[in-house]
Amino acid sequence: MSFFFKLFKNTETIETPQPTVVDNFSETEGVLLVEDIFSIMGKGVVLSGKVLSGGITVGFSHPDGVEVRGIEQFNKGFNTAMQGDQVGVLINLKDKELAQIFVEENNNQVKFNKA
């Protein structure tokens, strides 16, 4: 009997870890706490911050007409951001000053809904 056979014979089955589900995840709305605003030439305005609740997906919009065009986290593009994620959200506004007014009107907490 080989060493590996003895080793695996005495071990119980190894359970695969199950993906964790965020308690407050919503596929229809999410709130972003905006910490900073950037303007990227050729792309638009990026709201940088943390997702406080729910989830944000590309295509979500705010009742004022602001739409999510992209989501990035650590220089990688994503379609969805979940609660607790630190992300940059590309929106359809082209002017940084308009974005600042938009964020200030919402008390730095922007709520996006499924369009």
Image (spheres, rainbow, N blue to C red):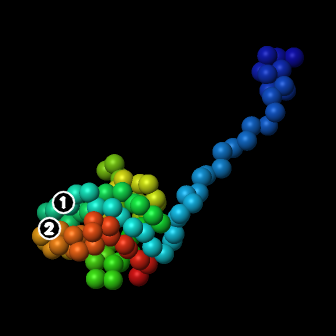
User: What residue type is disc 2 on?
Assistant: Lys
45 up-or-down from 87: above or below: below
Decide if residue 63 is on the left or right side of residue 10: left
Name of the residue lying farthest toward the right? 1
Label 2: which secondary element: helix
| Sequence-earlier tag: 2 or 1 | 1
12 up-or-down from 106: above or below: above
At label 1, counting other C-alpha atoms closer than 10 Å, the crowd grade (few under 14, some 14-19, many 20 or more) is some
Quadrant location of the N terminus in the rendered image: top right
At label 2, counting other C-alpha atoms closer than 10 Å, the crowd grade (few under 14, some 14-19, many 20 or more) is some
Decide if residue 60 is on the left or right side of residue 19: left
Q: Position of residue 80 (x, y in %)?
A: 44, 63
- In this figure, which residue is indicated by the disc labeled 1? 38
The residue depicted at 17 percent of the width and 68 percent of the height is 100
The residue depicted at 55 percent of the width and 58 percent of the height is 22
Q: Say the numbered circle drawn on residue 16.
A: none
Residue 16 visible in the snapshot: yes
Q: Position of residue 39 (x, y in %)?
A: 16, 62
In the image, 106 versus 22, the foreground residue is 106
Q: Position of residue 4 (x, y in %)?
A: 77, 21
Label 1: which secondary element: strand
The residue depicted at 18 percent of the width and 60 percent of the height is 38
Do the CB atoms of the residues marked 2 and 1 lie less than 8 Å apart? yes
Residue 90 visible in the snapshot: no
User: What residue type is disc 1 on?
Assistant: Phe
The residue depicted at 65 percent of the width and 50 percent of the height is 18
- In this figure, which residue is indicated by the disc labeled 2? 96
Q: For residue 62, which quarter of the picture?
A: bottom left
Decide if residue 35 is on the left or right side of residue 83: left
Q: Position of residue 6 (x, y in %)?
A: 83, 20
**Count of numbered circles in the view:** 2
